[in-house]
Amino acid sequence: MNTTPPGTQDAAPGAEPDWRRRFARFIERPPVQNALLALILLNAAILGMETSATIMARWGDALTAADRIILAVFVLEIGLRLVAHGMRFFRDPWSVFDFVVVGIALIPAAGPFAVLRALRVLRVLRVLTMVPSMRRVVGGLLAAIPGLASVFAVIVLIFYVGAVMATKLFGAGFPDFFGTIGRSAYTLFQVMTLESWSMGIARPVMDAYPYAWAFFVPFILIATFTMLNLFIAVIVNAIQSEHAAEVRDIERVVTDHADQDAAAMRAEIRALRQEIGSLRQAIAQAAPEAPGMTGPSRPAS
Amino acid sequence: MNTTPPGTQDAAPGAEPDWRRRFARFIERPPVQNALLALILLNAAILGMETSATIMARWGDALTAADRIILAVFVLEIGLRLVAHGMRFFRDPWSVFDFVVVGIALIPAAGPFAVLRALRVLRVLRVLTMVPSMRRVVGGLLAAIPGLASVFAVIVLIFYVGAVMATKLFGAGFPDFFGTIGRSAYTLFQVMTLESWSMGIARPVMDAYPYAWAFFVPFILIATFTMLNLFIAVIVNAIQSEHAAEVRDIERVVTDHADQDAAAMRAEIRALRQEIGSLRQAIAQAAPEAPGMTGPSRPAS
Amino acid sequence: MNTTPPGTQDAAPGAEPDWRRRFARFIERPPVQNALLALILLNAAILGMETSATIMARWGDALTAADRIILAVFVLEIGLRLVAHGMRFFRDPWSVFDFVVVGIALIPAAGPFAVLRALRVLRVLRVLTMVPSMRRVVGGLLAAIPGLASVFAVIVLIFYVGAVMATKLFGAGFPDFFGTIGRSAYTLFQVMTLESWSMGIARPVMDAYPYAWAFFVPFILIATFTMLNLFIAVIVNAIQSEHAAEVRDIERVVTDHADQDAAAMRAEIRALRQEIGSLRQAIAQAAPEAPGMTGPSRPAS
Amino acid sequence: MNTTPPGTQDAAPGAEPDWRRRFARFIERPPVQNALLALILLNAAILGMETSATIMARWGDALTAADRIILAVFVLEIGLRLVAHGMRFFRDPWSVFDFVVVGIALIPAAGPFAVLRALRVLRVLRVLTMVPSMRRVVGGLLAAIPGLASVFAVIVLIFYVGAVMATKLFGAGFPDFFGTIGRSAYTLFQVMTLESWSMGIARPVMDAYPYAWAFFVPFILIATFTMLNLFIAVIVNAIQSEHAAEVRDIERVVTDHADQDAAAMRAEIRALRQEIGSLRQAIAQAAPEAPGMTGPSRPAS
């Protein structure tokens, strides 16, 4: 059981025992993956039905039991994958995600952790890790984030400065909106989404501080212009990869064509050289008695 | 009437009778199409006027009569097209659309189907299928949808998970907003459109659950960022087809130019070969007595 | 004064009298144009000051007088241009715009036309026709419109159908929002801008008609998706002209380069022909007694 | 101390004394820059904590003292840079920004300048000038502005005309919204952001002036369409620089390829010329007695 067959392709120093690879292969088999996906979707439906008091009154016990069984299957699956891949399991972010969302459901959701009950539905997001096309979408979204880090840092800074200023300026008069830095940041986020920024926030504030517009209007202009640039960065990134493909396409076609032209030309030149070769023969035959014809004075052609 | 003329071009095994094709040709004739378009627009005006109590009080009977006559013409037209094309009629999505929107008007709009009365105005959308430029726009919109399926599935998943979480977290306190999954999904759709998300939803909820912002702010960020990527996917698709045209343009011009260059060069080389050919002849004439000139030792040029 | 000098370059059958062209040249002279621009900006300031009761109480007479004088100058200017260009004046849309906005100010703004008083400030928009860079911006905006006609027609159709449906469905219960087609169209425009669509419109309607969301949510999705495509069409148009320039750039550089390569090659081939020419001479000199060397059997090289 | 060493590289007429350059080098040293950045971030935290009454009650004195010390360091740093760079300091916009935001903190924030207290947090924005990646983002945002000047001027004009019209039309009835040009401009800015434009502004106004929609709907369409073009201008600018890079890439690859083809061809032709050269030698050797072989009739090869 512990003997590794010789000649294994990826035989690392600590080569994996046979049963580990058998587990890994078992879990990655398409029918197993499809069954898991079906279980996740079934679990999603059950978690949805659990929110209905009417349904819970009639089938509550059955639903809770089904939920527990599915959870047990998930725990088993994660366990198998942990055993199969060892510590490498935690190097794959999708695996870590699966581990966390299944792990949340195991925390006894009572007392201070009661809110975790609601987080158990995050398990449904495992669909994202199972369906390749959705995984690509999420991967694409996450891949766009590092390129946005600088713009994001600028926006955070603008928010922090704006929140401190708003707290100092309007905090005393409008504690609900601007009482603390946290509240100010939330209110400024609301202002940036343009939700009730004027009727709900700026106009009441302007009744007390008539020049408050000189804070809100520039804040909106700066925040939305910076956000716009965040969006444009995403668009330009997307177009950039388009362009790379386009450049390759143009290169391929144009150079293919140039190669054909060059090949045709080389054929012509080859014909020319043959003609000259036959010409030289003709000359050699016309003047066979020439002494130096094959002598050392002839340069290397 | 049933005899198919010999030599019909698209004579399939079950070849169409003559009158079928005559019907099809009659309906596709430009004057008939224009008359139908005019009828649809007239019908649009009548359906609009029918919403006015004042107009209905004076000309109600005439309008209803005109509406019925136009509907009869539409039924006749669809009937003719059904007879002309047979089952192929249902393979064209535009035809199916016409069939459905005309069919809705024939359902007796009473009792449980009273709401279908309002759907009868959908008939006006037949303009979309009649005017080629509008048909292209709608076709373009619909063509963009399959490419968006994955992003759309991710958004639906985010909504489902968000709705279940919101129902569990806030359902008890705010039954109007988050009482059931359906209500939560509607409220989250409203939040995603940023309509009154803070003043109307999040702030009242935060009065009861102070940490509710930790649900709403991330939800807005995730939902709008994913929506943004939906939009960007549409933009990049549109640009992609632009690019394809551009690549073709560049290829055409560059390769045309290269071909001209190559042709000029080949002409030069051909001239060169002629020159050499004449040179060989000159040599042959200069030394006609050479014995091996036409002998077997001469290699094939 | 009426004698046209002979040999005028653009001497059409009805050639323009000398003074006409002198008027045209006078108005188009930079100092005159700058003076007009200054007058328009001064007029803008005056029209702004006229809205303040305090300023009008003190300097009202002076402002009104200045406004009238400036208006007189504008009328004179338009008159000169009309005389100078004749009917061609009305072929330039910018001129027609000037004519209309100045003309509005001449209508006695009393009785039913009192609202035209407010339109007199449109005169300030003449800045757009005077400053070339702003004229380009407006020209660009207007140039984008024809390409959007089809999408715009689709949106109008969606609005009409939506308005008729909403009037039939909700008109009885909510006459303020959906009482007539006009009111419904206005409300749907508000819904499309997402302003209070849920809290202000859809939720109250849903209290009476629980399934109203089935109208509003699809309407928002369809309307915003179509609007999005309107925006994308503008973006793609802008990028398209970018691309045209790019294609030209690539063509120019690549073909220039190819031309240089071809020129170098031709120089090489020319050298080759010279060499062959000298070779033939060498042969001719080596065998001068050959009879047919310059005979008719030599093909045209 | 005042003696400039001979042979200084950038020895301008008024060459800088040694200690000036030593100051400049000292401030630009990475550890000094990092220490300054740490101080700015610490200062940001202190300024944030100062908004909390609870924290100020316990550690107020320490925080105020720390704030003053940090401010003193900033003043010292700016002073050193001023001494080091002289008047050139004011030519760098980032330096001017640092100078202004540090200077604001030195104004005694009392009496009419009390509001400047809130502006002291702008000091935190110095992070933007210290972190290169954030500096690039801000630089990019500012670089986009000149290209937008014309569109921006058009928007300002539209706002001015709209504000004057709205003041004249609705000022009497709605002094809070449209009482003065300033209030109208603010209200129209709110309308352009689509915040409560209908429920909060247009519908109340329409109750008094039923045709008010004829002002608001076109204003929204024109303002958002123009804003859209502002955004598109930013996107197209961003794509433009993309394109420049793409054009260079395509050029490089295609011309490199063409050069390789051309070089190969030239090598072929060179070989051909050598062949012909050797051929001529062969003929010369075959007929060495030819008299004019090296005569003047031979063209320059």
Image: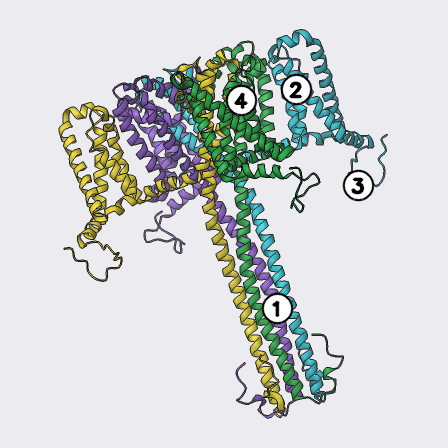
Chain colours: A yellow, B purple, C cyan, D green
For label 4, the crowd category at 10 Å Cα-Cα, with few meaning under 14, some 14 to 19 and many 20 or more, is many
Q: Which residue is mark 3?
A: C9
Q: Between marks 4 and 3, how big is the CA–CA gap?
A: 70 Å
Question: Which image quadrant is residue C224 in?
Answer: top left
Query: Considering only vertical position in the picture, is B267 above or below D149?
Result: below
Q: Which residue is mark 2?
A: C44
**Residues at circles 3 and 2 in contact by the CB criterion of under 8 Å:** no
**Residues at circles 1 and 2 in contact by the CB criterion of under 8 Å:** no
Q: Which residue is mark 4?
A: D105
Which of labels 3 and 2 is toward the front? 2
Residue kind at label 3, given as amino acid type: Gln
Image coordinates for residue C292, horizontal then vertical, percent: 69, 86
> The residue tagged with tag 2: helix, strand or loop?
helix
Residue B116 placement, left or right of A220: left
Residue at (57% x, 76% y) in the render:
A273
Which chain is disc 4 placed on?
D
Give the number of callouts. Answer: 4
Residue kind at label 2, given as amino acid type: Ala
